[in-house]
Amino acid sequence: MSEGNGGPLPVVAIVGRPNVGKSTLVNRILGRRAAVVQDVPGVTRDRISYEALWNGKRFTVVDTGGWDPKAAGLGASISRQAEYAMQTADVIVLVVDSAVGATDTDLAAARILRRSDRPVIVVANKVDDERSEANAAELWSLGLGEPQPVSALHGRGSGDLLDLVLDALPEAPREQLEEGGPRRVALVGRPNVGKSSLLNRLAKDERSVVDSVAGTTVDPVDSIVTLGGEEWRFVDTAGLRRKVNTASGMEYYASLRTEAAIQAAEVAVVLLAADEVISEQDQRVISQVVDAGRALVLAINKWDTLDEDRHAQLEREIDRDLARVKWASRVNISAASGRGVNKLAQHLREALASWETRVPTAELNAYVRALVQETPPPARGGRAPKIKYVTQADVRPPRFVVFSTGFLEAGYRRFLERKLRERFGFHGTPIEISVKVREGRGTDRKKG
């Protein structure tokens, strides 16, 4: 649930059987393509929250997987997510395919919703013209009041529906969140490394659908979990298979939202599988986190399944393949057994503390001056640049600006980064160093 200026927002749950157009309706309400839509049933598998705005009022829309009371296996897990959304919503929107009419599943859902103390609005979807409105009228049989004819695809009737939703919303949402909110953690990694299993372990609940088929999670899923005596907001995301510009269809939009989840987070836990080699996909996920400037924790899953020889081999692989993120905080865990999972909180706090560290300017410059006297920057074009001043321009992540009389080679900038880490820590966070070349008297007083 999102928080606006007035606190937590009321919640509208979009429910219905598979492939009736729930995600298309969510996109219509949001005015953008946020929910995954594909012309096959079962694309949405978890309950997904989005913030919406209509006529100046903000609320949270929850997209759910297709609900089926007779479902088994993965389908049963999806149905439980939808049922949970019904229980926690302020308003429930039941979407029915008007072209098909009320099915046994629709009737079963209506029987449950008639016993609910929440306002329920029936949407007769796929009413694309006046000729289709007769089909919508037949849905009075559900016993939930007047069906609202809507074409989620074309937008017909969506404004009237939103007006009804606003009228049904309570003044205050049922659940209140603490001010400030928990720290935001993106749980990312390539498909099938155990992200949803870890989230369920942390939440002590079947919060995300878990299946042996890679790619079960498509949308980011928010969960508030208590870890190390503190609440955290975890987002479980779809596994990233390939670059966004080479993905297509459902995978393309899932990749976009995984990137958005990283951007919205403060710290990312990148899950790696201990029983597999570090792959190009793993490297790409880590690069996304670093490029986004987020704190980073590497969690090595399935560590307890390995023998000592594989432990030693994996350590060598990490040293070789992840040398550029030696600064990342690292923890060995088992999502299946729970071993080491409680240590995550300590690593998250450490990475976030580093991410928000600001070094006093006087202390920073005293250290860099002594460092430069001992190891001056190499000459370029027969002339050695002089470092005149260093300032920390920002935190989250820490960003430093070096004012110099000349260009500093990439190797020397890496040297400065390494030394800053040795002196001030920054364990678990990327740091950025940029150089401003300023020649002539007094120009170094400008901080730019």
Image: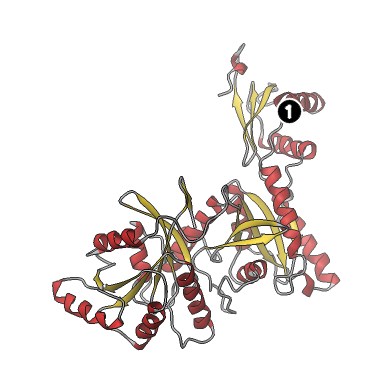
Residue at 63% in and 56% down = 232
Percent x, y of residue 317: 75, 61
Q: Which residue is mark 1?
A: 364
Residue 424: which quarter of the image? top right
Q: Report whether residue 247 is seen.
A: no
Q: Nearer the viewer, residue 346 or 2?
A: 2
Q: Report whether residue 3 is seen.
A: yes
The amino acid marked with disc number 1 is Leu
Percent x, y of residue 236: 57, 64
User: In this picture, is 391 found above or below 132?
Assistant: above
Question: In the image, is 19 to the left or to the right of 415?
Answer: left
Residue at 75% in and 40% down = 421
Residue 157: which quarter of the image? bottom left
Residue at 29% in and 62% down = 164
Residue at 20% in and 71% down = 128
Q: Residues within 10 Å of mark 1 (few under 14, many from 20)?
A: some
Percent x, y of residue 154: 24, 65
User: In this picture, is 126 found above or below 435?
Assistant: below
Percent x, y of residue 4: 46, 48
Q: Quadrant of the C terminus?
A: top right
Q: Nearer the viewer, residue 418 or 354?
A: 354
Question: In the image, is 116 to the left or to the right of 354?
Answer: left
Question: In the image, is 379 to the left or to the right of 39?
Answer: right
Question: In the image, is 332 to the left or to the right of 211?
Answer: right
The coloring applied to the image is secondary structure
